[in-house]
Image (cartoon, rainbow, N blue to C red):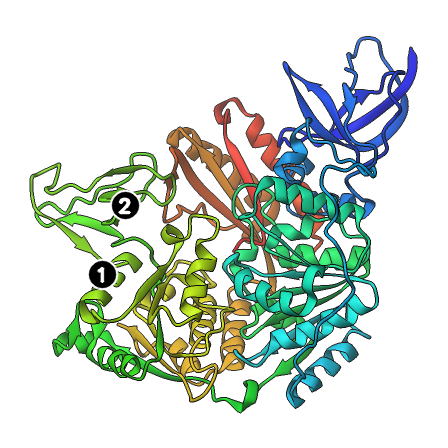
């Protein structure tokens, strides 16, 4: 028996929690949070020291030595380590998955040294404590500011519900300035990278170089430099970023703002950890002592419920800036329009007339269609065949500009067939996306200057900024876009917003579909009439009597919330129940079915009626992986950790069975 120094190391892998290594006598034992280079199978890997211990080791167990300590100081603080541990536990994933998500890619490169010496390759951003003049708050904003400060005396988390264009951002700016003036740091989260463009310019004008921007569109080298600077820097700083910014190191964090808190973009879908940045931000606030402000015009049902029950503080801003009216909503009955032959392609006659009027008055228009590409699919008029992806159970989207069909799940492409490959029949396009909409706009309004903002037109680093800047400068008359255009953007001359097809927002097989449709429609409506006269919104639908449109026309967020709350309680959905989805994947459909039934039977015995039947998702195969799903709904007052531990036992049992070899069972806690 011999005694030595050992360390448990986190590696960016989903196989185990930690790996144990020996620290040889030639190396000074590194502290927790330090990067180390270690051997792993036949290669090397960068890991993070998780735990130090001295223990007796049996000679029969071969424990390998670490190769090198990569940094002179820990790159991970105690707070960050606690946050990683919480995420791994709450979201039921190995801490290695959290590490892979949390650190910039260059941190996993052993050639990159995080040096804190005077001779650093890159200097820290120059710092000045000068804050330029802020806009004065209106009476309503001043009251909201005071109420937020007061609410923080009793609640660490406060929900600010302010109608679109009420000036929430200006309230944020004053709260941020208060904290920076006291020498503190602030984290400002936004759900979409597109939102950082206008927001950054606005904040830069006030806070200068106290501002840093962090999201996935900046280079890996810049991400690593910002991470390193944050680790070394204790100066007052404002970090603006998308969800990954919650992983940055902070030395003196006092305020976290989660803007558009209702947005599903805050939820990481793939890969693990499948975390929600809003939830992580709240835990980060608890660990650091920072106050948290959730801001939105359309609160999530869960956040609004937490405010109603007193878990969160609650402040409202009920009037638009400078007393402007909320936009007027017109619902267009597409069935009636088509019956009367009062349509041009996908534009109703009333909408065409209104667009012409606004263009003649040199106003700007936003057209929203939440489908990119030219059309969702093409179909044979004779046999009904629809070209599908060879690797995914999904129809191929038509992209006319590229002259190809594309799978939006795996990227597989094929040429657009002129005739049906099965029977030789004529192929016809069905539905429409933003690309087709752009073509129709050019045909209808040939003099208008048109731009399109979707995933296809914003692939390059600066594409977002170029389109938004061009529209803001009035170099574009009509902006067509997906949900990128629905929230957080401010344009002075947008007088009309049109939703070309609201129905697919309401037809999703999800208990959140009505909530999301309301939020998206209300948010996109808020882009109209932000200065000057009242804006107009046209919403085209085949189902004008759907109750959601009554709430939209009255801008009745509270009525929508109360109706959804009753429905959620009746059918055992959040916030009254917590939900965990188990996603089962395998390339062999028969083996997948066997595993799903085995797991379902065991869970049914353990959890009873809390377990749903096996669900066949609407897209049952992605990238050659067949998919099944089992959902658990557990009472919100139940012991969730006990439920998760029990669930993990059953997952491990199923994965260990020979007939289930190779099965992937992925827990998704609080799925969106």
Q: Is residue 362 visible?
A: yes
Tell me the residue that label 1 is attached to. 439
Tell me the residue that label 2 is attached to. 395
Instruction: Please state which of residues 69 and 296 is positioned toward the viewer in this rendering.
Output: 69
Report the Cα–Cα distance between label 2 and label 1: 22 Å
Label 2 or label 1, whichever comes before in sequence order = 2
Quarter of the image with the N terminus in it: top right
- Left/right placement of residue 230 relative to residue 495 reads right
> How far across and how far down the image is residue 65, in percent?
79, 16
Measuring 19% from the left and 42% from the top, which residue is drawn there?
A: 416
> How far across and how far down the image is residue 242, in percent?
59, 55
Which numbered dot is residue 220?
Answer: none
- Above or below, comparing residue 671 to residue 160 in the picture: above
Whether pointer 2 and pointer 1 mark residues with C-beta atoms closer than 8 Å, the reply is: no
Element type at marker 2? loop
Q: Is residue 310 visible?
A: no
> How far across and how far down the image is residue 343, in percent?
17, 74
> How far across and how far down the image is residue 642, in percent?
71, 47
- Left/right placement of residue 269 relative to residue 509 reads right
- Left/right placement of residue 244 relative to residue 534 reads right
């Amino acid at each position: 028996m011999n005694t030595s120094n050992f360390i448990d190391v986190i590696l960016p892998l989903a196989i185990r929690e930690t790996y144990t290594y020996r620290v040889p006598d030639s190396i000074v034992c590194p502290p927790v949070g330090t990067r180390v280079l270690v051997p792993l199978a036949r290669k090397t890997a960068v890991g993070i020291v998780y735990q130090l211990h001295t223990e007796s080791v049996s000679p029969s167990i071969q424990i390998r030595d670490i190769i090198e300590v990569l940094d002179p100081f820990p790159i991970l603080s105690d707070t960050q380590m606690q946050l990683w541990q919480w995420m791994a536990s709450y979201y039921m994933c190995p801490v290695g998955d959290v590490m892979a998500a949390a650190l910039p890619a260059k941190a996993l490169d052993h050639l990159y040294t995080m040096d804190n010496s005077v001779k650093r390759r890159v200097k820290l951003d120059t710092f000045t404590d000068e804050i330029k003049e802020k806009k004065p708050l209106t009476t309503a904003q001043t009251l909201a500011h005071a109420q937020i400060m007061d609410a923080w005396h009793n609640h660490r988390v406060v929900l600010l519900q302010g109608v679109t264009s009420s000036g929430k951002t200006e309230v944020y700016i004053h709260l941020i300035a208060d904290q920076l003036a006291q020498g503190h740091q602030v984290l400002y989260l936004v759900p979409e990278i597109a939102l950082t463009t206008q927001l950054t310019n606005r904040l830069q004008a006030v806070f200068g170089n106290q501002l840093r921007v962090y999201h996935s569109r900046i280079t890996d080298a810049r991400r690593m430099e910002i991470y390193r600077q944050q680790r070394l820097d204790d100066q007052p700083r404002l970090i603006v970023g998308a969800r990954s910014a919650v992983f940055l190191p902070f030395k003196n964090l006092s305020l976290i703002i989660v803007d558009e808190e209702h947005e599903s973009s805050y939820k990481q879908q793939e890969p693990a950890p499948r975390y929600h940045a809003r939830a992580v931000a709240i835990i980060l606030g608890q660990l650091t002592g920072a106050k948290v402000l959730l801001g939105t015009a359309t609160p999530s049902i869960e956040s609004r419920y937490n405010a109603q029950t007193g878990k969160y503080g609650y402040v409202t801003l009920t009037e638009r800036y400078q007393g402007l009216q909320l936009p007027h909503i017109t619902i267009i009955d597409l069935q009636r329009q088509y019956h009367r032959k009062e349509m041009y392609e996908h534009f109703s006659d009333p909408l065409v007339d209104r667009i012409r009027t606004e263009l003649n008055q040199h106003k700007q228009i936003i057209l929203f269609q939440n489908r990119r590409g030219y059309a969702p699919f093409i179909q044979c008029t004779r046999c009904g065949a629809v070209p599908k992806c060879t690797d995914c159970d999904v129809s191929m989207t038509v992209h006319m500009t590229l002259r190809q069909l594309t799978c939006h799940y795996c990227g597989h492409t094929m040429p657009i067939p002129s005739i049906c490959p099965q029977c030789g029949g004529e192929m016809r396009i069905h539905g429409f996306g933003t690309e087709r909409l752009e073509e129709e706009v050019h045909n209808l309004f040939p003099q208008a200057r048109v731009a399109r903002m979707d995933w296809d037109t914003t692939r390059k680093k600066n594409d977002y900024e170029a389109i938004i800047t061009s529209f803001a400068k009035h170099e574009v008359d009509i902006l067509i876009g997906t949900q990128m255009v629905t929230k957080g953007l401010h344009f002075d001359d947008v007088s009309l917003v049109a939703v070309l097809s609201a129905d697919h927002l309401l037809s999703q097989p999800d208990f959140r579909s009505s909530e999301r449709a309301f939020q998206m429609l209300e948010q996109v409506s808020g882009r109209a009439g932000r200065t000057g006269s009242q804006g107009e919104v046209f919403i085209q639908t085949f189902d004008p009597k759907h109750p959601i449109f009554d709430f939209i026309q009255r801008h009745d967020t509270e009525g929508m919330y109360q109706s959804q709350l009753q429905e959620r309680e009746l059918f055992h959905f959040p916030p009254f129940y917590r939900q965990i989805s188990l996603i089962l994947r395998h390339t062999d459909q028969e083996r997948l079915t066997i595993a799903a039934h085995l797991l379902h039977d065991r869970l049914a015995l353990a959890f009873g009626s809390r377990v749903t039947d096996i669900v066949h998702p609407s897209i049952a195969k992605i990238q050659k992986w067949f998919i099944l799903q089992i959902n658990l709904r557990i009472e919100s007052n139940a012991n969730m950790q006990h439920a998760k531990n029990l669930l993990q036992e059953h997952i491990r049992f199923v994965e260990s069975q020979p007939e289930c070899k190779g099965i992937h069972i992925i827990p998704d806690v609080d799925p969106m």
